[in-house]
Structures are given as C-alpha cells and as structure tokens.
Amino acid sequence: MSNTITESNFNFPNQKSVYIGKVRVVHNINDKELVMIATDRLSAFDVVMPKGIPFKGQILNQIATSMMKATEDLVPNWLTSTPDPNVAVGHLCTPFKVEMVIRGYMSGHAAREYKAGRRLLCGVVMPEGMKENDKFPEPIITPATKAEMGDHDEDISREDIIAKGIVAEEDYLVLEDYTRKLFKRGTEIAASRGLILVDTKYEFGKTKDGKIVLIDEIHTPDSSRYFYADGYQERQDKGEAQKQLSKEFVRQWLIANNFQGLEGQTVPEMSDDYIETVSERYIELYENIMGEPFVKADVSNIQERIKQNVLEYLNK
C-alpha cells in the first residue's frame, strides 16, 4: 500500500538516536525532546504484520494526543506539540520498563487465563464464578514487562517488579495511583460516548528533572479494549459475544487463520481487500472513541509531508 508509512528513515537536524518500536519510531533531538512518529504498522501477538493499514498511524496519534490533553489535569504527560497528523513531540524521558495494564472487565488475556483454570494474574486474585466479559468488583492492575521488538511482553506481579528493582517502590506507587486515575477518567469519557472502557495499558517515563509523566499512547484502540454500552448486559445475560471496539477483531482473524505468534507459525496473507476493511474499522473506532468524524490527512506523499512538517517545527 503506497498510501501508508511503515518505515521511517528520517534523519532530522541534531538527531542523537532513533528507537524503533512495534508501531512508533522515536527520534531523540539534541537529548532534549523526542519526535515520535506513529507509523501505519499493525502489531498483534507482539508480531508486526507485513502490510501497513491506511490512516492507522494518524488515528492512533490523534486519539492519543487528544486523550493526553483530556487527562493532563490529573496526570502530567510528555507531550508538547503535534506538528503533523502522525507526529507527536514531547520531553525526553527515560521509560519505565513496565507497562501498567488495568482491567475493569475479564476479557482478552485475563479471560484466556481464567478459562485455563488460573485464578491468579500478576499476583492479583480473580474471583470465582465469573464468565468472560463480566465486570470485576474493582479494576485490577496486571503489569507486564516491556519486550523488545519480536519478543513477547511478560506478565509480572507488583511484588516482583519491586523485588527485582525494575521500578523503585516509591515510583511504583505513583505509577499505580496515576493508572487508576487515568482509567477512571477514561471510563467517564468512554461512557459519555456510549462506550465501556474494558481494559487498557499506560506507559510512564521520567523527565530529566525526575518528574514521572505519561508517555506513548493513551486510550487508543491499540492499547485499549472498548465495548458498546448499549446492550452490554443483555449480551452477557444471553452468553453472547460483546460488540467491541479494539484491534481484537484482528487477533480473532489471525487465530482463525492459525496464527498466535507462536514459534513455527506463519503470518497469514492479508489481501488488499482485507487491509481496506481493517482501515475502515480503525476509522469507525476513531469516530466512536472521539465522538467526531475522522478527517483523512493527505497521504499522496506521506513521507515528504511528515518530513516537511517536522522540519518546520524544529526550525522554529
């Protein structure tokens, strides 16, 4: 797909280093600020798919930057500017090596663990007698270690994070507090749009002056799972699948095509028609989560557009 960005080989003025994540590419400018480009890459089961999804990077970037602005009164974040639909700029931070996953409902990974008979997830007890997509009595925090490209994120308990020195206890308590505050606000925003925020993950870092801030993305369909609130209880009572807004539909398609990122498995071929349906679903996700129509950016030469917009920002 020529109208997507899957590689980012920019070399900006005063660039010190580049970090390539599964979806985002982060450029360190002068050890002072970061230019983060949201590509159209699609990652599932910790594997990057061979083809990009049109407008996916723009969708993720615009949801994340909007949600950061909607939560900055609760939790400080790294963001300072958005010079391009696919680009966010912010303070240089040292990331914590954990993802703070919080779950309001027993879905996805938690439900798969539960179905396998396990009642302990990251050191947190899941009550007996629950069924998939039931609401937890209280949201639970189930952290994961951050994996390098190609590796799998691993579940880890709060106790292990502190005992292994991955995060100092004093800092970890702040991460937990921020995670609960963000999830509460995210739940309220979702409810105002007829949605249920099921689960999500947050990432945090420290600025040069030691301040803990929210980084990366927030409340996007890549980092979060949403249900439609309308009819949720009826579907639960009947034992039906929930209507959801997340990239879970991609995971389910991959599972149906015998791929879960396990050794020896091959990523199934994604036809252009299938890629187009995924792009349409992401636009639907945007419009429901944001409560406004999605405006497509000019993608006739997406690399050049990003380059010019970032250069103009840096030259200011």
Image (cartoon, helix red, strand yellow):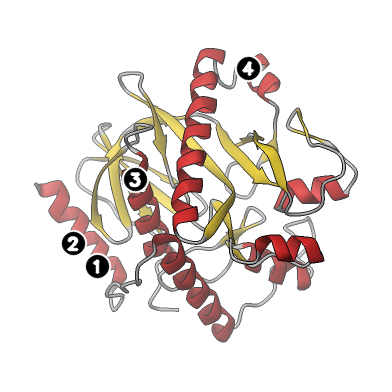
Residue type, mark 1 in image:
Glu
Seen at 36% across and 18% down, the residue is: 210
Q: Could you tell me which secondary element the residue under label 2 belongs to?
A: helix
Seen at 54% across and 84% down, the residue is: 272
Seen at 39% across and 51% down, the residue is: 64
In the picture of the structure, the residue carrying the numbered disc 1 is: 304
Q: Position of residue 134 (x, y in %)?
A: 74, 50
- Real-space Cα separation, disc 2 to disc 1, in angstroms: 6 Å
Residue type, mark 2 in image:
Gln
In the picture of the structure, the residue carrying the numbered disc 4 is: 162
Q: Position of residue 7 (x, y in %)?
A: 42, 62
Mark 4 or 1: the one toward you: 4
Residue 217 relative to residue 153: left or right = left
Badge 2: few (under 14), some or many (20 or more) residues near its Cα, within 10 Å? few
Q: Position of residue 159 (x, y in %)?
A: 69, 19
Camera sees residue 238? yes
